[in-house]
Amino acid sequence: MSAHNPQLQWWKTGVVYQIYPRSFQDTTGNGVGDLNGITERLGYVADTLGVDAIWISPFYPSPMADFGYDVSDYTDVNPMFGTLEDFDRLLAAAHHRGLKVIVDWVPNHSSDQHPWFVESRSSRTSPKRDWYVWRDSKPDGSLPNNWQSEFGGPAWTYDEGTGQWYLHSFLAEQPDLNWRNPEVVAAMFDTVRFWLDRGVDGFRIDVAHYVMKDPALTDNPASQDPAGMAHFKPMGPFNAWEHVNDRGHPDVHGVYRDLRSILDGYEGDRFSVGEIHIFDWDEWAAYYGDGDELHMPYNFSLVWAGWNPTAIRARIEAVEAAVPSHGWPNYVLGNHDEQRLATRYGPENARAAAVLLLTLRGQPTLYYGDELALREASVPPGRQQDPWGIRVPGMSRDGSRTPMPWTPDPGHGFTDPTVAPWLPFGQDAATRNVRVHLADAGSILNFVRHLLRLRRNRPSLQRGTIAILDDVPEDVLGYVRRFDGEQTIVLINFADSTQMVPAAPTATLLAATHDGGSLLGDGMAHLAPHSAMVIDPGPAA
Ligand code: NOJ
């Protein structure tokens, strides 16, 4: 049906659930999650929770310098996670349940252990030398330019064996591929076809804007505003520079036009979403192309907006204005790179944040564990894993990557109780876990399940227009979604005090973060502190 009605394409109507495979379910008893674990938990994902698609972070062979974002073989499964057959079973089981499957694609860099790089660094005359970005020192012996690695330090590492520097926008173990070499393009597009042929429904593209840089490798200018929002979030010395030359060169659009034509050549609605940290919204929206590039660039505008109605409204409006009419918006509030949402926005706002994520216009991505409002876990120094956190104080991502707590028991249903999981569980896993939450009608998990069902059953939430309401108190964000005569009103109170918003006498409550039959009455919505409600105002006038 969706093929004939673009409005109903799954990636427009559906909710995507991000699974970090190391932390979802361990079936081998080694303290690390695996693909068979994901397959075991598909009933939870598809039916108990009720999302429409999963995105699985990398599970490819990798030395794990950056936990899988350093790929040493793009077309296989790391034995730690299982086998290709396990992946095929996962995919078939997911499809059987009506779930779509998105896999990660990491085009900007491979592992330094990838045979391509091993060959490339073997000599200056290697046939694969130009598959990566190699440069001589400057005449004074200094680095080729001033580009910095996101993870701290210069983006260049000197190779003693061949006397040149290679570029790595991330770790030295993650050398950047040279996308200006047609052989690289062909080889990388073959990896895309490999997974499409196996039946995957789409790709999440790692740092998609990085693949094309200034071909002259010009220095980046110093930043005029090192702490500003153009930098998304504080990232230490990396933010001292305007990253205008080391990523996002206009030639990048040709890459995604070519990728799109590959996707469009396959049956079904194959999907692409790019991880793109750009906050100039016009430049960001350019990745939609004329409907011939990415299906969407990720919208991270709200991740570090703060829990503030003015900032959130401004960013919703900016993004809505930038998304082209042929494009489809999306929202992310949390992922494996960011502090847990419940900690970032405040635990008292976790339910309201779920309302925001699941009622805005566009595709929501829900990060595993946010349905339990998992807090950022504190990981003791001896157990830290994230290379970024180890290199740059304050940047650790470990706290949002801890294992999913399924039960209150030792091992929390994630792993063998006698085994230490790769990262420790969150401190409150004995009470904040799936089993306990399912048994508690008032839990956030049951609330999120309710929201997901509501969204599925209300076309206005899935695909309606959005209009922000002006006639609400300043501490409230309100918007109305409309589709074909159906209206849904969303009200979110950001204040510590109760807020009142006029509501039609005919209005009925569809969802509320806080219990209470009297939330709607006397022609008013009574919004408790930090609460949100979803209202059906009755038939459109
Ligand atoms: C973005 C990924 O989300 C992150 O986890 C990774 O470390 C970098 N890209 C480098 O691949």
Image: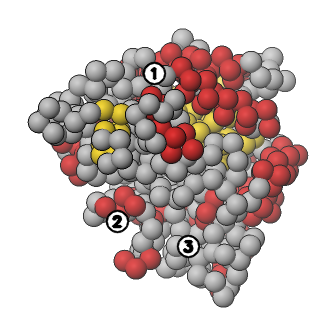
For label 3, the SS is: loop
**Classed neighbour count for the residue bearing mark 3: other residues with Cα under 10 Å, few (<14), some (14–19), many (≥20):** some
Select label 1 or label 2 by which is in front: 1
Residue 390: assigned label:
2
Residue 38: assigned label:
none
Task: Identify the residue shown where x is 62% and y is 20%.
Answer: 260
Q: Quadrant of residue 166?
A: top left
Question: Mark 2–mark 3 contact, CB under 8 Å?
Answer: no
Residue most extreme to the right: 96
Task: Identify the residue shown where x is 31% and y is 61%.
Answer: 391
Residue most extreme to the left: 140
Q: Give whichever of discs 2 and 3 has the lower sequence position.
A: 2
Identify which amino acid the numbered label 2 is placed on: Ile
Q: Give whichever of discs 1 and 2 has the lower sequence position.
A: 1
Q: Nearer the viewer, residue 466 or 541?
A: 466
Identify which amino acid the numbered label 3 is placed on: Trp
User: Which residue does the numbered mark 1 point to in the structure image?
Assistant: 180
Quadrant holding the N terminus: top right
Q: Nearer the viewer, residue 343 or 480?
A: 343
Residue 197 can be seen, yes or no: yes
Q: Is residue 295 left or right of residue 163?
A: right
User: Which residue does the numbered mark 3 point to in the structure image?
Assistant: 422
Q: Give whichever of discs 3 and 1 has the lower sequence position.
A: 1
**Classed neighbour count for the residue bearing mark 2: other residues with Cα under 10 Å, few (<14), some (14–19), many (≥20):** some
Residue 505 can be seen, yes or no: no
For label 2, the SS is: helix
Identify which amino acid the numbered label 1 is placed on: Arg
